[in-house]
Amino acid sequence: MQNSLFFKNVINSDSIFESIGQLSDIAKKTIGCEHISLFLIDEKHQSTPASYSVNISTAVMDQLQQIVLQTQFFIRNPDGIRLSVHKAESHLKNYLLMSKYECIYGFHIKHGPSYGALLFSFPSDIQLTEDQLQLCNLIKLHMEQLIKKIQFRRQVLKQKAYENLFNTLRVKDSFTVDHCYNVAFYSTLLGAKAGVSEAELERLKLGALLHDIGKIAIPDHILMKPGRLSDEEFNVIRQHPVIGYELLKDLPDVEHLLPIVKWHHERMDGRGYPDNLQGEEIPLLVRIVSIADAFDAMTSTRVYRDSLHVHEVREQLLIHAGKQFDDELVRIFLSIIDEQMQMNG
């Protein structure tokens, strides 16, 4: 398995079912887990959990759901709790027997008002090693991030003016829209790790989401050209930060977003555009988005080139740290990527 493809595929998933399928394949190959299933509840709107899995019968999911409910979503138990047909309490043992699994491991899932359990189900009664438990924990981390991204997509566009602009971009170029969502997600991961406040994180999310909104005005034959741009075409592309600024500047409550939209192509060494800012002249949130933007661009497949391996992208970020990118933020971002890349196989 290529770690970079695993990481990118999960992050790019648009549904929990899609991601569960990918994660289940990984778990089956690496630790012999027959199925992964997710049970998730929104405490504000639900009384019973929503369930997610692939290639598993409704009857079996019902038994697993009962285990989750009986253990109160594993809140009372430590992460990675093991339930076995040979050692479980009698009522839980019965559910396991009816599910045809001899052993399950449960992990807490928590994000905002949503919480629940991620179950790893095994056909035989096994004891996972510490390394295998670490793998399960990494899969749990990916699932929590996916839930966070999906909720973000649903909630972030609350003002109609933003929504109309973004939908216009969606019709014109769905690839750029997906890129914007990914940049917003990566920016939030980096911002949180860098100590950005909750209020600033919200600003960062929306600014990152809208950072390429100026591409609405870029002609299709340039924006979607399947090859290297000419100097003249590149000069047209370089106008998108200023165009985005002009599109947004007269909308209500956007002053805090404008620097991200206008300056996300500025560089620490002053060789960026449109205003040749350098160093600390570039606001922190802008510097964060610049790294997230470059990372997603390099790890995405374009019409004119394949995606780069994450290891190659790490090298590029290191090479350009202190020149194009904030050196300290690159270090923090690479620590995030290294955490994601712990899975081997």
Image (cartoon, rainbow, N blue to C red):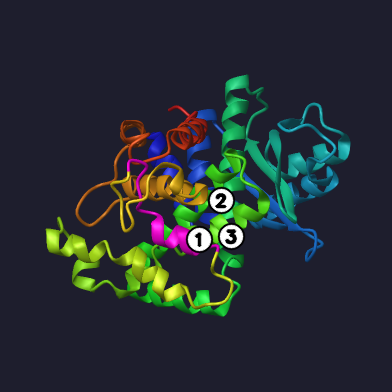
- What amino acid is labelled 1 in the image? Gly
- Sort mark 2 into few (<14), some (14-19) or many (20+) by Cα contacts within 10 Å: many
In this view, the mark in front (1 or 3)? 1
Q: How far apart are marks 1 and 3 (CA)?
A: 13 Å
Q: Distance between the residues labelled 2 and 1?
A: 20 Å
Residue 298 placed where, x, y %? Answer: 32, 45
Magenta part of the chain: 256-269
Position of 14 compared to 238: left or right?
right
* Total numbered circles: 3
- What amino acid is labelled 3 in the image? Phe
- Residue at coordinates 35% horizontally, 53% vertically from top-left? 265
Which comes sooner in the sequence, label 1 or label 3?
3
To which residue does mark 3 refer? 152
56 inside magenta stretch: no
- Residue at coordinates 78% horizontally, 31% vertically from top-left? 78
Decide which of 222, 146 is in the foreground and name it: 222
Decide which of 174, 62 is in the foreground and name it: 174
